[in-house]
Image: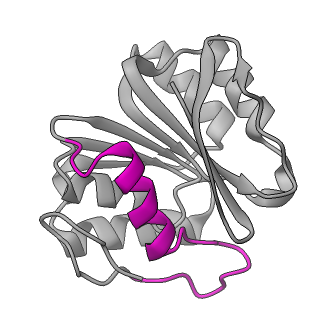
Amino acid sequence: MRIVSGSAGGRVLKAPTNADVIRPTSDKVRQALFNVLGQTCDGFAVLDLYAGTGALGLEALSRGAVKAVLVDSGREAQALCKENAQALGFADQVQVLPFSADRAIVKLHEKGEKFELIFADPPYAQQAVAMLLHKLAEHPLLSEGGRLVLEHGVEEASPESQGPFARLDFRAFGDTVVSIYG
């Protein structure tokens, strides 16, 4: 697993010891995702919910984002996010929050935070797409014109719209589906 492109392109990320607990987004899916989103994230603030290794947020930093908030309640994931950010030279631009996605959304909203790009890659068994859309509608964190990227299993439906969110794109990669909302 490595950073696909940008200033840290080709650099290797530390992987989890147990891929059943932390399921990183593959290089292939990240490349395809950024092909859809655009190759640069110049000046973006990025939120990565269920961050795991931090690969999505770190990929955005490599492509010009100025800040990444990486959220994960797992201790191994928190350590991986910090280690990977440090190894890539992004430690000063990364904040790791040791919370559940629900709690982080509420806390970040209370602080008035806004993000141009939000990634959420929950465990597929949680069926979390509708819950995340509802929670982010209640506690808006997405900047005007921003994108919300939800990664989920093929068996979980993603609505065409929910609250303020409209699905702009939908891509399947084997067992993985990426739904992009604006």
Is 34 magenta? The answer is: yes
Examine the residues drawn in magenta and state their main secondary structure.
loop
Residue 157 locus on image (x, y percent): 83, 42
Residue 65 location, quadrant: top left
Residue at the bottom extreme? 17
Q: Is residue 59 left or right of residue 125?
A: left
Q: Nearer the viewer, residue 52 or 169?
A: 169
**Quarter of the image that includes the N terminus:** bottom left
Image vertical order of residue 176 relative to residue 109, above or below: below
Report the residue at 64% width, 15% height from top: 137
Is 139 magenta? The answer is: no
Report the residue at 40% width, 13% height from top: 112
Q: Nearer the viewer, residue 67 or 175?
A: 175
Residue 97 locus on image (x, y percent): 47, 46
Report the residue at 28% width, 65% height from top: 85
Q: Nearer the viewer, residue 176 or 77?
A: 176
- Looking at the rendering, the stretch of residues picked out in magenta corresponds to 14-41
Asked if residue 113 shows in the view, the reply is no
The type of colouring in the image is one colour
